[in-house]
Image (cartoon, rainbow, N blue to C red):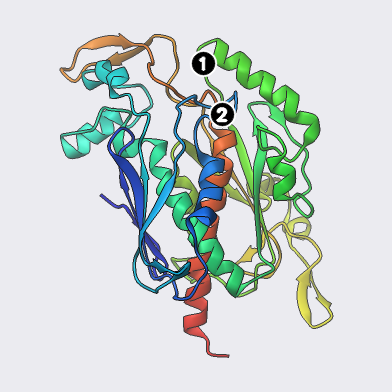
Amino acid sequence: MASQFGQLFRISTWGESHGGGVGVVIDGCPARVPLTEAMIQKDLDRRRPGQSKIVTPRAEADQCEILSGVFEDQTLGTPIAVLVRNKDARPSAYEEMAVKYRPSHADYTYDAKYGIRNWQGGGRASARETIGRVAAAAVAKQVLSRLVPALEIVAYVKSIQDLEATVDPATVSVDQVESNIVRTGDPAMVDSMIERIEAIRSDGNSVGGVVECVVRGVPPGLGEPVFDKLDAALAGAMLSLPATKGFELGSGFAGTQLTGRDHNDPFRMDGDRVRTTSNRSGGIQGGISNGEPILFRVAFKPTATIMTPQDTVSTGGEDTTLKGRGRHDACVLPRAVPIVEAMTALILCDHLLLQRAQRLD
């Protein structure tokens, strides 16, 4: 199973949703980077369940433990292992799923691939696997702060179903996003988004939406042509997240409605810096960052588990029905925001280290 990610800053996540715990091993982190459990915990708290009335009520503190690679609050340059123990696992809620495939889940496809699956909450297919990614990204952010102090990563809920927020990527801040439980950058949309999620949940249903992410202060030159383009790396990272169904950069699909004359980003000089007068490229041209803010969007489908009966088949090949059980998010968007930021940090950290290895000036 491909549980490794990255080239120089490499991570390997492990663990199942209802097993003893989940975590990550990080290899390739430079030595003498400040790191404490509190630094990691800050991001894990943003991802954890039970943090508000509109997310899953699973009662997990997601308390992290650093097992190796850190001494006197600094990284050693050796592998860093981080563990989060599962405290509120309830595998009995999934007993029916042992013999019935949940629609739009990975149950059938895991059986088709491996001939065996962990039916307790989906095992590795559960979004609980992303704990390891968020923990690793907290380490990556410490590296990024040393390499590029001005770099900022801010993700936010752009839309939930047909409710779309108006957010200025140039000015939106993490504090602004974290000031509301939806994690949108538009205060005027908070109440209506909360009401939509609560109404959908009360109907035993689910809803999806879009997370937008902006990265400001990115230096030009990051990205590896031809196959490891920065935008391709970001797309692969985002689409590796559970429930993702789409990725677009800059103008995205809307850019197809423009002509080249309207879509191109003219260059200009700003002191000794090369800048663009517009940013329809989303900060990446030819697969390499151009120094403008990177802007992209990730589409998340409605949560696959719903609390109403659906048609499915059994592991024995019989038509049947299945109603969702357990504790689930009616909308994954609020908790997806820190996960999108995490994958962005991992990609940028890896590419910054690659760039430093390629150029000595």
* Residue type at the position of mark 2: Gly
Which numbered marker is on residue 318?
A: none
254 in relation to 265, above or below: above
Return the x and y of residue 251 as percentages of the image width and height. 68, 50
195 in relation to 343, above or below: above
Tag 1 secondary structure: loop
Dot 2: few (<14), some (14–19), or many (≥20) neighbours within 10 Å? many
75 and 271: which one is in front?
75
**Which residue lies under the disc numbered 1?**
205
**Which residue lies under the disc numbered 2?**
208
Q: Who's the residue at 72% across and 58% down the image?
A: 260
The reply to whether the C-beta atoms of the residues labelled 1 and 2 are less than 8 Å apart is no
345 in relation to 255, above or below: below
Location of residue 281 (image quadrant):
bottom right
Q: Who's the residue at 56% across and 11% down the image?
A: 202
Q: Quadrant of the C terminus?
A: bottom right
| 85 on left or right of 343 | left
| Total numbered labels | 2
Return the x and y of residue 152 as percentages of the image width and height. 67, 60
Q: Who's the residue at 52% across and 77% down the image?
A: 355
Dot 1: few (<14), some (14–19), or many (≥20) neighbours within 10 Å? many
Location of residue 24 (image quadrant):
bottom left
Return the x and y of residue 297 as percentages of the image width and height. 61, 46
* Residue type at the position of mark 1: Asn
